[in-house]
């Protein structure tokens, strides 16, 4: 198969990202093959896919990729971390016992890195969504009718600084800051679940309604952009509003924005700001704090 005819293979998990990536590449007439993971990709996406497999069906996944001979492979959309026993069983034919133990002892970044290495060992070039569809990356600047005030900007700087600091611990990519106080740090549950936790704090009066706050989301320091880029969308804004927050800040050029038009419409309707900050902007605000 000539290189010009080789497709891009999308390994599709849950959420809206796989569909947004398919749409973006289709608009550019890029040849595609989509492999959807059952239990994560929704029905509409599975109907668009060329094949569906179970997440841990490594043999069938590699067989599909070998048949398609893709130019590049991209992973798009979240999946839940499988049980250790299931991972051990699925990868036993491809990894020795010591490597498997190291993978299972690592966080999500380590496990995803192991998946990338396995794909590369089978002759596939793995790339990130940002390389294929840079138009899905969030832009710099205020994107909404409402802008953050100095109070919110100070909270955003604290959030960005915190996310940089905890990067080496394989923690989450999002944090909620109220004033100068850390209200919640994202864990394996994801951003939406974190925001629902903050909303529960409001409900139980552990964090009072009159206290203001922001949600901040960006990449980890040294993050491999081929896996698990942070993403925001309409649901992020809705959950931030329900949690009583003033707005959403993200790392511009480092965060995927899904269904941007709907997200900004929702933010304007609810009176929230959405702002994208470059690394230089964050450093400047940190130094002046």
Image (tube, rainbow, N blue to C red):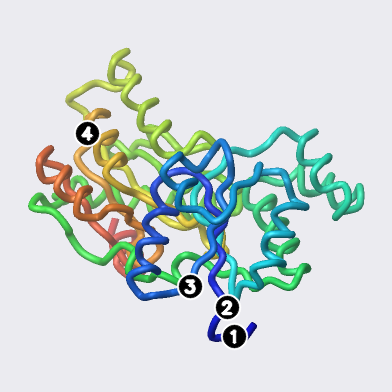
Dot 1 crowding, Cα within 10 Å, few <14, some 14–19, many 20+ = few
Element under disc 1 = helix
Image x and y of residue 58, in percent = 74, 51
| Quadrant hosting residue 135 | bottom left
Front residue (pair 124, 98): 124
- Foreground: disc 3 or disc 4: 3
Discs 1, 3 touching: Cβ within 8 Å: no
Q: Identify whether 125 is placed above or below 147.
A: below
The residue singled out by tag 4 in the image is 241
Mark number, residue 31: 3
Discs 4, 1 touching: Cβ within 8 Å: no
Mark 3–mark 2 Cα distance, whole angstroms, equals 7 Å
Discs 2, 1 touching: Cβ within 8 Å: yes
Element under disc 4 = helix
- At 33% across and 39% down in the image, what residue appears? 177
Q: Residue furthest right?
A: 97
Q: Identify whether 202 is placed above or below 252.
A: above
Discs 3, 4 touching: Cβ within 8 Å: no
Discs 3, 2 touching: Cβ within 8 Å: yes
**Which is more N-terminal, label 4 or label 3?**
3
Asked if residue 222 can be seen in this view, the reply is: no
Front residue (pair 136, 195): 136
Image x and y of residue 85, in percent = 80, 33
Image x and y of residue 116, in percent = 68, 61
- Foreground: disc 4 or disc 2: 2
The residue singled out by tag 1 in the image is 3
The residue singled out by tag 2 in the image is 6
Dot 4 crowding, Cα within 10 Å, few <14, some 14–19, many 20+ = many
């Amino acid at each position: 198969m000539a290189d010009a005819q080789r497709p891009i293979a999308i390994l599709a998990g849950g959420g809206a990202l796989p569909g947004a990536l398919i749409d973006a590449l289709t608009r550019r007439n890029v040849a595609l093959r989509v492999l959807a993971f059952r239990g994560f990709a929704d029905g509409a996406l599975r109907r668009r896919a060329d094949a569906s497999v179970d997440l841990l069906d490594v043999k069938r996944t590699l067989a599909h990729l070998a048949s398609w001979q893709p130019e590049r492979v991209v992973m798009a959309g979240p999946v839940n971390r499988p049980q250790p026993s299931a991972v051990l069983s699925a990868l036993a034919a491809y990894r020795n016992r010591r490597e498997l133990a190291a993978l299972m002892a690592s966080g999500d970044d380590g496990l995803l890195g192991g998946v990338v290495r396995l794909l590369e060992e089978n002759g596939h070039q793995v790339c990130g969504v940002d390389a294929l569809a840079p138009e899905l990356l969030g832009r710099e600047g205020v994107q909404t009718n409402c802008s953050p005030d100095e109070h919110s900007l100070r909270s955003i700087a604290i959030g960005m600084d915190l996310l940089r600091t905890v990067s080496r611990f394989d923690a989450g990519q999002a944090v909620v800051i109220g004033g100068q106080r850390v209200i919640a740090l994202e864990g394996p549950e994801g951003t939406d679940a974190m925001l629902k936790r903050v909303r529960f704090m409001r409900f139980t009066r552990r964090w009072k309604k009159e206290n203001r706050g922001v949600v901040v989301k960006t990449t980890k320091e040294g993050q491999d952009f081929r896996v698990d880029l942070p993403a925001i969308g309409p649901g992020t804004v809705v959950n931030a509003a329900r949690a009583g927050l003033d707005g959403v800040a993200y790392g511009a050029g480092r965060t995927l924005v899904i269904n941007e038009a709907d997200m900004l419409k929702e933010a304007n309707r609810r009176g929230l700001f959405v702002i994208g900050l470059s690394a230089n902007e964050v450093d400047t605000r940190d130094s002046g704090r």
